[in-house]
Amino acid sequence: MVCARVGEDIVDETRNDEFGLSREGMLAVVEPAVAPLCEPGRAVVHGLVGLACDCCALLPQSRPEPKGVVARLEALRSLLPADGSDARAAARAAGDAREDVAAAQSA
């Protein structure tokens, strides 16, 4: 969802006062795609946004170490169902969103 929009269009929404990423702004951008997911999927997306914000901290010493990033990613992956049901729901939601945008643009 984030890459479907032009960067200049979302920079003010997603940047904080210190030129890092804003958790609230990023969540507002991804929330339409997250809404159809069950709770584990929502928690994972929120965790990924938090991780992205931490990795984009302005000061290098504030960013997580690579091993910490891997550990956080593994912890988030462990929350997802093994059958991939959230991934399918997200793909359906993304497809529905693309269809809504296409319909709005052609109207």
Image (cartoon, rainbow, N blue to C red):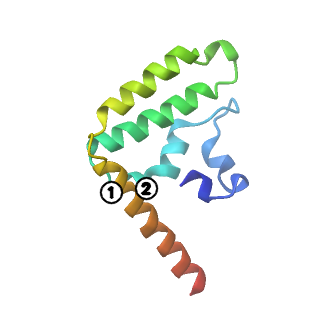
Residue 15 placement (x, y as % from top left): 65, 40
Compared across the picture, whether 15 is left or right of 85 comes to right
- The residue labelled by disc 2 is 33
Q: Is residue 70 above or below residue 80?
A: above
Extreme residue in the bottom direction: 107
Residue 105 placement (x, y as % from top left): 59, 80
Give the residue type at disc 1.
Answer: Pro
Q: Is residue 54 above or below residue 68?
A: below
Q: Residue at x 43, y 56 (%)?
A: 33
Q: Is residue 17 above or below residue 71?
A: below
In front of the other: 82 or 12: 82
Quadrant of the rendered structure where residue 76 is?
top left
Q: Residues within 10 Å of mark 2 (few under 14, many from 20)?
A: many
Q: Residues within 10 Å of mark 1 (few under 14, many from 20)?
A: some
Residue 17 placement (x, y as % from top left): 67, 33
In front of the other: 86 or 19: 86
Extreme residue in the right direction: 8
Q: Name the image quarter holding the C terminus.
A: bottom right
Q: Residue at x 69, y 18 (%)?
A: 59
Marks 2,1: beta carbons within 8 A: yes
Compared across the picture, whether 84 is left or right of 32 comes to left
Real-space CA distance between mark 2 and mark 1, rounded to the nearest whole angstrom = 7 Å
Regarding mark 1 in the picture, which secondary structure is present there?
Answer: loop
Q: Residue at x 41, y 58 (%)?
A: 91
Extreme residue in the front direction: 83
- The residue labelled by disc 1 is 36
Compared across the picture, whether 66 is left or right of 58 comes to left
- Count of marks, rendered view: 2
Regarding mark 2 in the picture, which secondary structure is present there?
Answer: helix
Give the residue type at disc 2.
Answer: Ala
Residue 74 placement (x, y as % from top left): 40, 26
